Image (cartoon, helix red, strand yellow):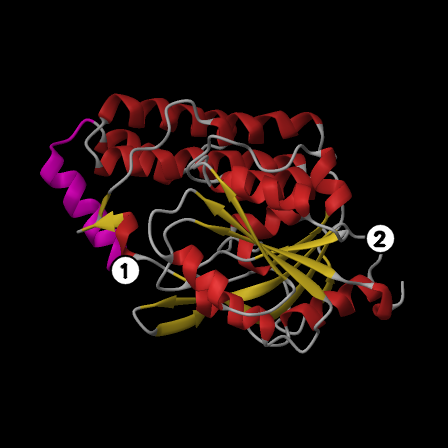
Amino acid sequence: MSEEVISFSVVIPLYNKESTVERSIRSVLRQSVQDFEIIVVNDGSTDNGTLIVESIKDSRIRLIHQANQGVSAARNRGIIEAKHEFIAFLDADDEWLPEFLKRIRRMVDRFPECDLYATRYYFDSSSRRRSAIVRGLPDDFEGIIGNYFNIALNSNPPVWSSATCVRKSVLAKIGGFPVGVKSGEDLLTWARIASRYPVAYSMDCLSVFYQSPSEFSEGRPTRVPAHDNIVGNGLAELQNIVDKDARPFLCRYCALWHKMRASCYLRLDMRSEARHEIVKALHYDVRLILIIYLILSFLPSSIIRKAFSFGSSN
């Protein structure tokens, strides 16, 4: 495929990000590749974010309004509205480095058989910036990932929503992003794609994920995990799709998801729910840390807090 024929639809979901949305849009406008449209989907914002978008004068920007339905519904609306086959996603509080789209275009040209293209990214928290940890790939890697779940098991999420480009046709085949999921909707989407289609990846960090301290308050989650666990159920369904070589790694990935939920429940002192998640995780993968979690669930809250405080400081 020739680089010249590739244009991008950039989808930015917007909900109450008046302080950061201009930075995100400007990072797209500064791209060294300029063949794109920007679709900002206002998901029922109540702040001045939409006014800021409207103040940026560029004919390639489209602002679409809808009632608040969540980030998945906003992204799905952007997918429907997209004019181009290659859809890149950017959250309204993140940004791209100037070479992001150029790198995606190069990978599309080099690996036309792939359906998902992504790069590594930076974490930025309180003005401290570090590269995402992606183990199992050389630092100069640019190519097709052989076993997505093996890499994802031992890394920060290798594919992040603000560092990703996907074919519109593939997003249509998997039904887009799962609606009604408040956390992990992107992880499930990338897993669904990676279990069916080849993924091209660059280890260069070309996107910035700005972390918010609001997810935890004094080491305690501020949001209770969703009871219906759509993500966990969706990951389990992939067992029948992935090839047999990837299946053991997918099982461990499922266990990791349930372990994360168990950790949240333990920190919230929701012991019964934590044990349920631990049992689920043990079904997929027997690990010492899960046994420790199970023991912790029967101990006083003060010990649980100390255990997690010790773990986070090491």
Q: Secondary structure at mark 1?
A: loop
Disc assigned to residue 113: 2
- The structure residue drawn at horizontal position 13% and vertical position 40%, both measured from the top left corner, is 303
Q: x and y percent of residue 251 in the render?
A: 57, 33
- Regarding residue 132, the answer to whether it shows in the image is no
Q: Earlier in the sequence, mark 1 or mark 2?
A: 2
* Residue ranking furthest to the right: 1
Q: Is residue 238 above or below residue 216?
A: above
Q: Give the magenta range.
A: 298-314
Q: x and y percent of residue 177 in the render?
A: 58, 37
Quadrant into which the N terminus falls: bottom right
- The structure residue drawn at horizontal position 51% and vertical position 44%, both measured from the top left corner, is 65
Q: x and y percent of residue 21 in the render?
A: 44, 62
Q: Secondary structure at mark 2?
A: loop
Q: Is residue 107 above or below residue 226?
A: below
Instruction: Name the amino acid, label 1.
Output: Asn
Q: Label 1 to label 2, Cα distance in Å?
A: 42 Å
Instruction: Name the amino acid, label 2.
Output: Glu
Q: Confirm or deny contact between disc 1 and disc 2 (CB under 8 A).
A: no
Q: x and y percent of residue 111 in the render?
A: 82, 60
Give the residue number, with chain letter if any, for mark 1: 314
Specify whether 37 is left or right of 292.
right
Q: Is residue 233 above or below residue 127?
A: above
Q: Is residue 305 above or below residue 97?
A: above
Specify whether 79 is left or right of 251.
right
- The structure residue drawn at horizontal position 52% and vertical position 34%, both measured from the top left corner, is 254
Closer to the observer: label 1 or label 2?
Answer: 2
In magenta stretch: residue 130:
no
- Regarding residue 279, the answer to whether it shows in the image is yes
